[in-house]
Image (cartoon, grey):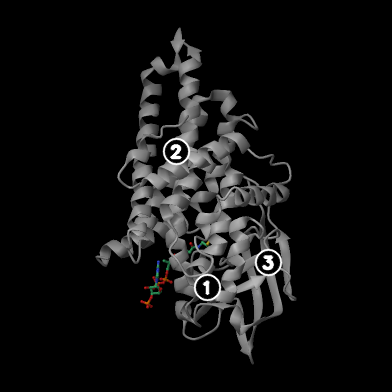
Amino acid sequence: MSDQTFLSWPFFEDRHRALAETVERWSAANLPANHGDVDAACRDLVARLGRHGLLAPTAPDPSVPSPLDVRSLCLIRETLARYDGLADFAFAMQGLGAGPISLFGNAEQRSWLKLTRSGEAIAAFALSERKSGSDVANIAMTATRDGDDYILDGEKTWISNGGIADIYVVFARTGEGPGAKGLSAFLVPADLSGFAIAERIEVIAPHPLARIKFERARVPASAMIGAPGEGFKIAMATLDIFRATVGAAALGFARRALDETITRVRTREMFGGPLADLQMVQAAIAEMALDVDAAALLVYRAAWTKDNGAARVTREAAMAKLYATDRAQDVIDKAVQLHGGDGVRRGHIVERLYREIRALRIYEGASEVQKVVIARQTLSGA
Ligand code: COS
């Protein structure tokens, strides 16, 4: 069992400790999933997580806009990631896709939340484009008003759950103003005429990912989430919540890598004793343990701050994501090193972690973007 002492930190309430125990028990009994067919595995994971009530924190109240409990989201991601990166992915993308609806959706749009939180429908968040992954204000996809409808035209890429999602939250240019001021968000069902999967994308830690395209795809104006021109802020407010949870997933990967390494260095004999007796190994273990605890402090600080009513946690969330993902990469690299040849053997847990951590430093705002965000917030005194 992983170190759980962090659960006694003042960031948490008893309900969080109970949730952590529930997720731990479920994960120990159900994970890892079979990754043979990632589409089927993700559909199955979403359905099972939903049936067990573990998706409820992704949409706490389907009937009215309600804040997400970021500590719950982070605890679930951290625990799932410790057991199985694909289970974390399935949970996280359900949360990110449903997030804008949960936070800003009207009554009609919210009817989808009953299905996403029960695992009966899969959600996706479609923001990135070929030329605007980091520079969101530069989105080119258009949504043009036509009577009571909007016509969607353009492409999105790197869309997680692309190909298996039932609904997509799509950000497009509606032109109320320049750049960030001219974007809006739309709730688009996957069976919309004019919508298609343009390409499935394979990555080093396989999960459903696609380039999607819209060709004169007509949606009613009621598909818009929030008001015209609010798309950028809806995307950023959603990312403020989910960036902390990316940090939590990285933390889960790092904890697993540390756990595996502790077992390894205690049991592997070298130079007449266990690896753990060597000071160079002890130095690595110390750095790994420090990185894990420091990442946990930043992640749960961001989550606690949001849950305690902060209007924006842009700086805290960016710090949590940047630090936790960068340090987890280093923790896992040390784990691979201390596992020697086993560490690079295909299918070994630390080899899997080594592949799984990499994308987290890129998606939902690359490390470089997080630095821009932190610097701006710090310089402006916000
Ligand atoms: N919450 C609410 N509002 C926000 C916000 C946030 N987190 N961040 C910015 N805004 C508001 C700003 O206050 C500003 O509003 P006003 O014009 O009313 O003052 C508006 O949105 C524009 O903000 P800003 O000027 O900072 O926009 P930029 O284009 O300069 O933003 C960054 C640049 C890099 C910060 C932004 O594009 C970003 O976060 N990019 C990364 C996106 C990402 O995560 N991509 C991955 C795809 S999802 S897997």
Ligand 1 closer than 8 Å to label 2 CB: no
Near-viewer residue (265 or 235): 235
Circle 1: residue type: Gly
Upstream in sequence: badge 1 or badge 3: 1
Q: Quadrant of ligand 1?
A: bottom left
Q: Mark 3 points at which residue?
A: 212
State the image coordinates of residue 13 (x, y, percent, origin top left): 36, 47
The first of marks 2 and 3 along the sequence is 3
Residue ID for mark 2: 330
What's under tag 3, amino acid-wise?
A: Ile
Where's residue 204, x and y in %? Answer: 63, 45
Residue type marked 2:
Asp
**Marks 1/2: CA distance?**
39 Å
Question: Label 1, label 3: how many angstroms apart (C-alpha)?
Answer: 23 Å
Provide residue 108's location: percent of width, then percent of height.
Answer: 59, 75
Q: Residue 36 carries which label?
A: none
Outermost residue toward the left in this view = 381
Quadrant of residue 14 within the rendered picture? top left
Mark 1: few/some/many CA within 10 Å (<14, 14-19, 20+) = many
Determine the secondary structure under disc 3: strand
**The label number, if any, that marks residue 105 in the structure image:** 1
Q: Give the residue displayed 43% in from the left and 63% down from the top.
A: 67
Q: Which residue corresponds to the image point at 49% horizontal and 34% vertical from the top-left?
A: 256
Eyeballing the image, is 248 above or below 243?
above
Is residue 333 at all visible to an observer of this figure?
no
